[in-house]
Amino acid sequence: MAITVIGAGLAGCEAAWAAAQQGEPVILWEMKPEKFTPAHRSVGFAELVCSNSLKARRLESAAGLLKEEMRRLGSLCVPVALACSVPAGGALAVDRDVFSATITEKIRSHPLITVKQGEVTDIPAEGVVVIATGPLTSQPLADAIAALCGGGLSFYDAAAPIVTAESVDMTSAFRASRYDREESGEGDYINCPLNKEEYETFREALITAETAPLHAFDRAEGLTVYEGCMPIEVLAARGGDAIRFGPMKPVGLRDPHTGHRPWAVVQLRAENAAGTLYNLVGFQTNLKFGEQKRVFGMIPALKNAEFMRYGVMHRNTFLNAPTLLDGAFRLKSRPDLLFAGQMTGVEGYMESAASGLLAGLNAVRQVRGQQPLILPRDTMLGALAGHVCDENAHYQPMGANFGILPSLDVPIRDKKQRYAALAQRALDSLARVTATMEETLPDLTEREDI
């Protein structure tokens, strides 16, 4: 029986290609041109909607490392992107039309891939299936997924920024939980205090900062968010003390540096089990990225913060993956059903494509009764898959960043050298895995510069 892949975006194309390249027949469903999402216009596959940039090329960047790992695992999108790139400094940007047309031609001409056009409204009951329908999954299929997974999927979301733990200035911060309620015994939160003057200056900058424009499909559908997900800048505009009585409330805390309760405080909560990443609790935002760095950098403890993800606000459709998926992107309750792309909680074009690549490889293994491919956590794709399946009560989408990788055994202070070392460790680790894989992988005797 052929492997079924639903959705011909980047993730679906990678999944279909990975499976077909291993000799398994694939049926790829795409609802265009019968039906379009509010964001898509082209009939081609792997349509890039919001940007033509696939982020940094250099290996010493998280995005560059991810693309190199993908290339070594037999990616379709990476070599096509390199072939149709346009000048963009250190980024890999592509001619969108040429990129989509090339991917479409390669998929349609593959002898083991059968393309079927039409909307899939239910989940196939039999066979190995990969669902890669993206953040704008059509409502009938979204309803079917929600019914299977026991919860809703589609909502409007405002997510908070994430910073690295090592970039927080602990001379200005302190560890504690409100009223000393904690589980770890060492303070479950990092608290970033502000005095009255610092708070008032920060709030003024926050309410006057420039916000990011909404996508046309978000405007058309009337973007609203839950009160609990209210953007921090919107809440701040409600009154001088609105955020001081909300996410920045100082009650139950005492700053050991002063012996007093702060005027206001920003709490940081661990984003991963390793404690390398922290998110700004209650700081969901729609500020432009540059404005986030400027305004949130006014918080004394975050003056040198390294942002691994900026806050975003958009329609999103993703699973509560830690409770539902394993590290192979398989549904725990039904291993022959895999998910890929933004629906899993990876964020970004190449991250979505990478999850599709891994899902496609694992779909083949599922068909053949083999053990799933779980990549090491010190690889970028392995770390992303780990983020998807790790227990996390506050699960939010994540893109590639060095903060999700395990720390080096020997710390390196210089960021550029540290990133280079993390990248080399990842590729060495991946090489050990690929050396034992049965899959047919590309000849990598000469590595291209991503």
Image: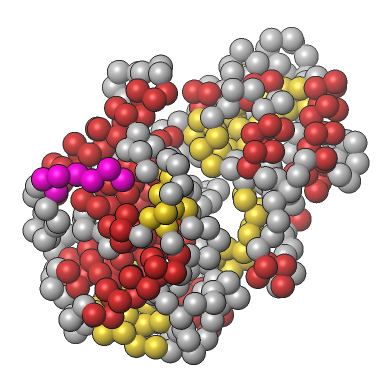
Q: Residue at image x 59%, y 18%?
A: 169
> Is the magenta region chiefly helix, strand or loop?
loop
Tell me the quarter of the image containing the N terminus: bottom left
**On screen, residue 439 above or below 334:** above
Q: Is residue 336 above or below residue 370?
A: below
Rendering quarter of residue 180? top right
Q: Is residue 446 magenta?
A: yes
The image shows residue 291 at horizontal and vertical percentages of 69, 38
Q: Residue furthest top?
A: 258
Give the camera-side residue of 320 and 129.
129
Judge whether 88 appears above or below 182 on screen. Answer: below
Residue 224: percent from left, percent from top: 74, 63
- Quadrant assignment, res 430: top left
Q: Is residue 7 left or right of residue 28?
A: right
- Residue at the spot x=43%, y=89% of the render? 118
- Image quarter where the C terminus lies is top left
Q: Residue at x 68, y 32 (%)?
A: 294
As rendered, which of 74 and 240 lies closer to the eye? 74
In this picture, residue 12 sits left or right of residue 318: left
Q: In this picture, which residue range is highlighted in magenta? A: 444-450
* 350 with respect to 249 (left or right): left
Q: Decide which of 101, 217 is in the foreground and name it.
A: 101
| Residue 380: x %, y % from top left | 33, 43
